[in-house]
Amino acid sequence: MRHGRFEESMSTLLRDYGESVSFDWRLYRHDIRGSIAHAGALRRAGYLSTEELDAIESGLKQIGTEIEAGTFTFSKDLEDIHMNIEKELTRRIGDAGAKLHTARSRNDQVATDFRLYLKEESVLIGDGIRVLQRALVGLATANEGVLMPGYTHLQRGQPVPVAHHLLAYVEMLERDHGRLADAAERMDEMPLGSGALAGSTLVLDRESMARELGFARVTQNSLDGVSDRDFALELLSALAILGMHLSRLSEDVVLWTTTEFGFARLSDRHATGSSLMPQKKNPDIAELTRGKTGRLYGNLFRLLTVLKGLPMTYNRDLQEDKEAVFDSIDTARMALAVTAEMMEALQINREAVNRAAADPALLATDLADELVRHQVPFRRAHDIVGKLAAESARTGVPLDRLPEELIRELCPELLADWNALFDPVRSMKARGAVGAPSPDRVSARLSHWTKVLS
């Protein structure tokens, strides 16, 4: 690139400061695919002979095989993966390699490679989401019918099935899967042919290149084609939200496996010990995932900050797009895999969760609902049951064992059925609205997800 225009050699500091091949090498397969498609378009336009096209394709595939095998030598002097491949190709096949960059800029080349890479990774991350969903559905199915306390403000609220709690994360992950699919659909545009910023007077068939590379369409504005990184931002945003969901699941695992909760046990394969305290069994996987969510957030804001003040079109700042995206992809894929493995091996302590779910205070809202059935206005019913709960807390007498005189005084409507009202199973059966945790609804949702994920 410096031939002709520059008289002095590049500063070694600039070389080291500006190189990207140390991280963008992972685009090599996509760069080779894009170059083969571009070469085919050059041949159809008459800028390459059939022999030159064959030499280019053969040379690029050989280079790809060597990179895959780890025998290819990269040079920082050539800055990036694109120039490393092109330079080596030209060294091997001569002038045909030097013709490859005809009607192409690194600006549209890297934008195309990056989109190809992210389209592929979006599918792989989506597959990882499916694996975790299957693990959660499997754990939920194994514990169908087991009840636990549901919480608001981390205070016990109402009983819910363990399966219903786990399926909440399956629903969250499905939204993550959908966001990835949405992002992949919008990144499914090929910028190749946009040139540096204004296309080329050597016009190539962009639509045929797009079809060959598996793109649904081509970009419609050359300036936007080379400078757009919205597709990377969307992916980073989707991964940040995914990380938030994984962090919330991880927090539940941390809480459930404490001695204080005792709701679940981690397998020995998915826990660590203490260097000092021999009795410890720590949920490090869950804690690490909580922490790594910060990386996913940071990478999104990192790229947003890089892009916010850029003038049209390509600016070297855009080199800073890849490390953030690569790191988020690696982090998300590993977090999904290790969380799925952890949840698949997690054991629910049924005795502990059932005991906790048997707390009569969890059915206080059911008492208010029953008063409503006796034509008591809900706010008055809420006040009455609140007074009963306060008396239970003050005296230490469980809600279902309060004196009959107090019940007769505050809510005589409930006296005849008082004991039957404190049945968690009865309570669950009554919650039959769509999305609620009745046994039938939970069973139907488990069947739905089993079918979807098969």
Image (spheres, rainbow, N blue to C red):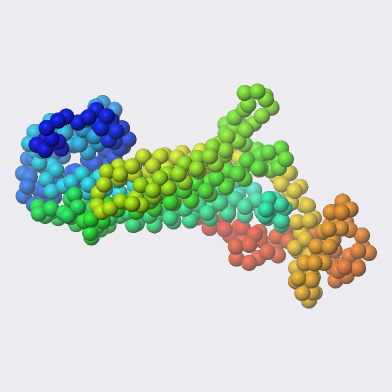
Which quarter shows the N terminus? top left
Where residue 13 appears, as percent x and y from the top left, is 27, 29
- Which quadrant of the structure image shows residue 324? top left
The residue lying at 29 percent from left, 33 percent from top is 17
The total number of labels drawn is 0
The residue lying at 89 percent from left, 65 percent from top is 407
Q: Is residue 18 left or right of residue 298?
A: left
Q: Is residue 183 left or right of residue 208?
A: right
Of the pair 104 and 249, the residue shown nearer to us: 104
Q: Is residue 270 above or below residue 234?
A: above
The residue lying at 77 percent from left, 74 percent from top is 377
Of the pair 99 and 366, the residue shown nearer to us: 99
Q: Is residue 132 visible?
A: no
Where residue 38 appears, as percent x and y from the top left, is 16, 47
Q: Is residue 266 visible?
A: yes
Where residue 323 appears, as percent x and y from the top left, is 36, 39
- Which quadrant of the structure image shows residue 320? top left
The residue lying at 40 percent from left, 45 percent from top is 302
Q: Is residue 224 above or below residue 282?
A: below
Single out the residue that lies furthest toward the right.
Answer: 405
Q: Is residue 439 above or below residue 295?
A: below
Q: Is residue 244 left or right of residue 197?
A: right
Where residue 159 appears, as percent x and y from the top left, is 71, 55
